[in-house]
Amino acid sequence: MDLRIILLLFISTISIEILGQKVTISGYITDDETGERLINANIYEANTQKGTAANNYGFYSLSLPKGNVTLLVSYIGYTSQTHSFNLKKDSTINVKLNLNADAIEEVKIVGHNNEVEETQMSMIEVPIQKLQNLPVILGEADVLKVMQLLPGVKGGTEGTSGIYVRGGGSDQNLFLLDGVPVYNANHLLGFFSVFNPDAIKSLKVYKGGFPAHYGGRLSSVIDITMKDGNMKKLEGNYSIGLISSKLSLEGPIKKDNTSFIISARRTYIDILAQPLLVYINSKNDEGIKAGAWFHDLNLKVNHIFSERSRLCLSAYYGQDKGYNGTENSKKNVFEGTQVNHTSKNRFGLGWGNAIASLRWNYLINKKMFSNTTLTYSKYHFDVSFENIENDLITKNKVENFFKYYSGIKDVSAKVDFDYFPLAGHEVKFGVQLIDHLFSPGVSQIRYENRINDTTNALDSVYGNLKIIANEYSAYLEDVMMITADFRINAGVHLSLFNVQDENYLRLQPRLSLRYKVAENWSLKASYSRMVQHVHLLTTAGISMPTDLWLPVTKKFEPPFSDQFAIGSVIILPNHLSLTIEGFYKSMQNLIEYKEGASFTGTATDWENKVEKGNGWSYGAEWMLEKNIGQTTGWIAYTLSWSKRQFDLLNFGNPFPAKYDSRHDVSVVLSHKFSNKMDIGLTWIYQTGNAVTLGTMKYLSAKIPGINAHFQTQYEVTDYNGRNNYRMPPYHRMDVGLNFHKQKKHGLRTWNISAYNAYSRQNPFIIIWDTKSVRMNEGSGQILKDKTILTQYSLFPIIPSISYSFKF
Amino acid sequence: MKRFQFTTLVIISIIGYSCTKEIEFDGKLLDPKLVVNAICALDSTFSVEVSESKNIPGFESPYRILNDATVLLYVDGTQTEKLVYDTTSQSTQGSFYVSQSALFNGNTIVESGKNYLIEVSHPEYSTKATGEMKIGKKVLILDVSTDSIPYIDNNSQNRHKIKVTMKFADPADEVNFYRLVINYRIGKNQWYRNTDGDTIKLVQVMDYIYSNSAIASDDPVFSTNENADEMLLGSTNQSGLTIFSDALLNGKAYNLTFYLNENIFYYFREKGMDTTRGDFYRVTIELQSLTKDTYYYFKSLGSFNWISQGFLTEPVLVYSNINNGIGIFGAFSSSINTIQNGEYPIEGISYYYGSVSY
């Protein structure tokens, strides 16, 4: 949309407000029991049929005519409230809602149903409380695994990290934890996510229709908000699983004034493996040492200075480590010479995120809410090899050490404003500055060779220089109710990226429309342009912690996408809602590995390993959802196509993206039998990933040369195009049973779960292999080699049991 | 490199713990294709090889030789010739392999500026495989000169290497593609006395097959990303297909520089070169002008052969310009210049021939 039109609309609404005779009610909508602010809670005035939703900090502001008003306040999972009074002047009304523990009654929402009412489309808010009822993996409920059950969201290859939204790549997703980017959202090579469900308040997944205040990635924004901490009383829970345990505590430091929440997790595969290693080492003298673990910590402190001012400090720290090696000493006599020798070999790897944010909410007036945030985000990866050989008799020593590390560090400051000039009218604007520091790959080598008192030594660091980039952005977003049935969210996001003396200024218009056909039915449409200024260099399309974040360069300009979407939301009887959406997304300036490329070096020459091209995806998504009642969940189906076209790949012909998936089906069910028992079940089906697989062999032409003797001919593999072949489909069922019992000091829960309940062998890779087959030939038998297609799978059924206690 | 090792280690570890099973291959892709290969030389007759692709899954089998194929040649839209199957084509070809294709020869001479269409049919195929090509004028080597460049090697020894400057004029207003081919023939004196005391004048002649390090060059035409990517080709020459386009030199006379492989001259460097006793070397420099399709075919074929086809590697797709089939219908012209030191052949000297794969 033309920027002038947006400004005109903005100015016109301001004028209307000045001319009108209205007063404003504003305040916070919170959980009565914990004081948690309820994001997106609804407030609706029945007489004027005007309403709004609380912002990310639970704040709302509604301008209404003076006189009698009837306010209806509602939030899914909570008992709604009605307040009638005579509104004479600007008022502050803070609403405290009570959790509807059974959540089996329909929330009475009159005239303001969130999904139907909202302009926002292509966004799914995953109910965190429902997450707890779904099957867990080795004792851990997982946010990313649940996200993969949403329509339009696809997981990558099993056993690796990465999600793919509406045909986009794994680097096109922006994970925000309390507004701070998280560059690697995975623990244990993608088996767990870094997001601890115990510390999370809300999870929103945007696949399209992006509001103007978001920017930085082409395909999705995953906005995760941590809990603020209970303002009323101390509570917590702990959980003990097969490979990990966790503890979460929250409560007031000063009641109704300052709260905290702290959540920590630690796996103990390394500890559990110790007896096995001791046994193995007792059988030989290799001194094997091996293990892998992760831990993470979420911390948040929230302080209320006054009704107008709040300060919030949140932090996350997580670390993964893996190692193996040997450490031993040998004493023996070899050919008459005494040997007293120690040896140490060690391979190690580690990666982790550290993020922090300091946020100050300040209510400038009843219509203007401000949010000032300082953030820090750091991701690092390292791998090391060490070998030490030490002769204790001769004092000779050889030591080799190599370490490679890479990472990215961001520091940012931003200011956001929410302005509520009229009922049904909200203006957001803000600015942000991010300093990026990329460390694409640095190597350290240490070498010492001491023989007969002569020492040769080397200690050197080399590799890529750090790259500094600055990103500036500003946005203006206006949510307007044009008529009672027609709403519009128009905005623009402006970004300026400076790297290596190059400036990229990009204007990103956004537009969302909603037309309410009936009380329970609305039609929606949206357009978004998104730009991103970073690339993730992955290994052969398999997301690993080794993947490198790199800035855009002169050669590879910022990728951008244009996405159009249309959709409909219908509220059906029996607490069902049906969402149907169709989308078309084009993506420019994408990168893909060249044919023949593999990761064989550091990032110095990465630009020579990739090609630039375009992509597009389109499809339709259906989601039938039920959030209320004893049986809740959703059934989702996605029909989609995702294509790429690169001039120098596949001879310029379009080809399917690696994670192009024609059919995605997911079923998520949770049923509460009683307060003592509930069951969760998920089932997912996805068309197999596209891979480039040789199908035939043929003979090449002879290569002409000066000497006819040297004319050569090769046997060539015919691939019939890039990503020409489909792996077998992926499907999996997870089942989990929860047994609850109310104890004197809290609620005890036993969870029994099975990941991949029917032990489907899902494909990880497929390759050609040969096997020998006994054949009858003549009077005897011979062995003949047969080429077969072999599938490697990772995870069979994985049962688990865990114990948790909430107090 | 270490990252690669780590990634490989992790993935191999994962695979090590994984389960495997044989799965069915999607049979829809298993129909064989007609394979038509012809890279014809300007001013020579047409030769077309016809074979058939074969399935990867299943038991290993030889290629079918489609000697009952029909190969027609069209020149500027008119059928001019039916190529004839060469009954000798299944005998030993050259020194190193037996062809598994049926060779069809024609009498038409390849000329520049004409449109050629090849049409191959076979009773077992419902569609005809076709390919088209047109070759431009020959680009001549205008001059070749050499310089001796001193340098100090890794062992702190003073050395000299031979720098070659080859001048040619790239035609303007058209896109041109080239291939540089270097051939080495070296003769080493192996004279000896027989039991009668007579001197047997024998020179051992070696032809070098340049599979590796045939040419060293820092010329910009090889350094463009498109042509001579270090990752794809290792260096400009390691695939043995040193190809380049005129992207950097369009329409200009250009002096292309490269260095001769020093290792090939190892014998002379260590023992000295005595041209009076029959020692010689002859370096043949060939500049091939390629059709565009031939260029892309060589480029992809070189990468295909050079790159190990692992599952962590993006596979290389070999270019084809054959409709309803697969292969290449291309052409090249060649201009040759020679650098020679020492006389060859010399009357009265016996030559013993061999080859070295280098």
Image (cartoon, coloured by chain):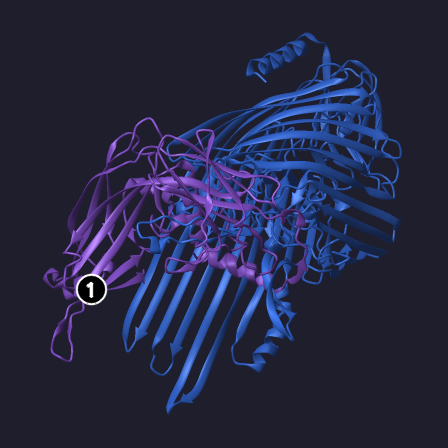
Task: Chain letter for mark 1, please.
Answer: B
Amino acid type of the residue that numbered disc 1 sits on in the rendered structure: Tyr
Q: Residue furthest left?
A: B276
Quick one: quadrant of the N terminus of chain A? top right
Q: Quadrant of residue A488?
A: top right
Residue on which the image places disc 1: B267
Instruction: Examine the rendered structure and indicate whether residue A761 appears above or below residue A576.
Output: below
Residue B163 location (% of width, % of height):
20, 48
Compare residues A473 and A178 and report the one nearer the observer: A473
Q: Is residue A133 visible?
A: no
The chain letter corresponding to blue is A
Colour seen for chain B: purple
Residue A109 location (% of width, % of height):
84, 28
Q: How many numbered marks does the figure carry?
A: 1
Left or right, A28 with respect to A429, comes to right
Compare residues B272 and A176 and report the one nearer the observer: B272
Q: Residue at x 77, y 36 (%)?
A: A623
Q: Residue at x 29, y 68 (%)?
A: A456
- Disc 1, SS: helix
Residue A696 location (% of width, % of height):
57, 51
Q: Is residue B276 visible?
A: yes
Q: Residue furthest bottom?
A: A336
Residue B96 location (% of width, % of height):
39, 60
Q: Residues within 10 Å of mark 1 (few under 14, many from 20)?
A: few
